[in-house]
């Protein structure tokens, strides 16, 4: 386990364009984005597309001690920061696995999603 900036440095990609960044880190997505947005926001400027898994809130984040609402608010903040940094959501799909589903009012609901974000520069496609 290492920080994004360290991985880029190790691979010699600090100033490279990253066409596709897949973030599937089993519950550490919030930690990744907090670190990236707080300490290294310039590194995300080189990323064209992000695939982000958003996991089952209770299943993954029980160890933080945070309430469900706090975790949802943390996710909301990260999604808003992605938007503020020029990323736009282009696709979202529920992960269709039993461990990522709950029963609500007799219906099965997904709690984890795959989302795809692309950079969008205003003026390019107006």
Image: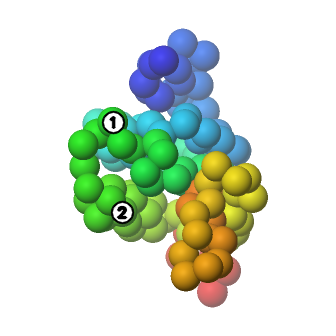
Q: Is residue 109 above or below residue 75?
A: below
Disc 2 is placed on an element classified as: helix
* Cα–Cα span, label 2 and label 1: 15 Å
Q: Tell me what residue is drawn at x 24 percent, y 43 percent.
A: 65
**In the orientation shown, which residue stands out farthest toward the front?**
106
Question: Closer to the camera, 44 or 24?
Answer: 24
- Give the residue at x 66% y 71%: 108
Camera-nearest residue between 126 and 49:
49
Q: Nearer the viewer, residue 53 or 45?
A: 53
What residue sits right under mark 1 in the picture? Answer: 63
| Rendered image quadrant of residue 20 | top right
Residue ID at (46%, 42%): 60
- Mark positioned earlier in the residue sequence (2 or 1): 1
Asked if residue 48 is positioned above or below residue 1 in the image, the reply reads below
Quadrant position of residue 104: bottom right
Image location (x, y in percent) of residue 86: 49, 64
Q: Which image quarter: residue 116?
A: bottom right
Closest to the camera, between mark 2 and mark 1, is 1
Q: Residues within 10 Å of mark 2 (few under 14, many from 20)?
A: few
Q: Position of residue 55 (x, y in %)?
A: 54, 51
Left-right relation of 81 to 100: left
Q: Are marks 2 and 1 in contact (CB under 8 Å)?
A: no
Read off the residue under disc 2: 72
Q: Is residue 58 left or right of residue 37?
A: right
Residue 103 visible here: yes
Q: Is residue 8 above or below residue 33?
A: above
């Amino acid at each position: 386990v290492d920080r994004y900036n360290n991985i880029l440095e190790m691979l010699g990609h600090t100033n490279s364009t990253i066409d596709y960044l897949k973030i599937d880190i089993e519950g550490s997505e919030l930690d990744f984005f907090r670190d990236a947005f707080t300490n290294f926001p310039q590194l995300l400027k080189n990323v064209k597309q992000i695939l982000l898994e958003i996991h089952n809130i209770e299943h993954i984040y029980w160890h933080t001690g945070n309430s469900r609402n706090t975790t949802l608010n943390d996710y909301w903040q990260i999604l808003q920061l992605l938007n503020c940094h020029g990323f736009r959501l282009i696709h979202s799909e529920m992960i269709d696995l039993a461990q990522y589903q709950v029963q609500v009012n007799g219906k099965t609901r997904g709690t984890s999603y795959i989302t795809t974000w692309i950079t969008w520069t205003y003026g390019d496609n107006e």
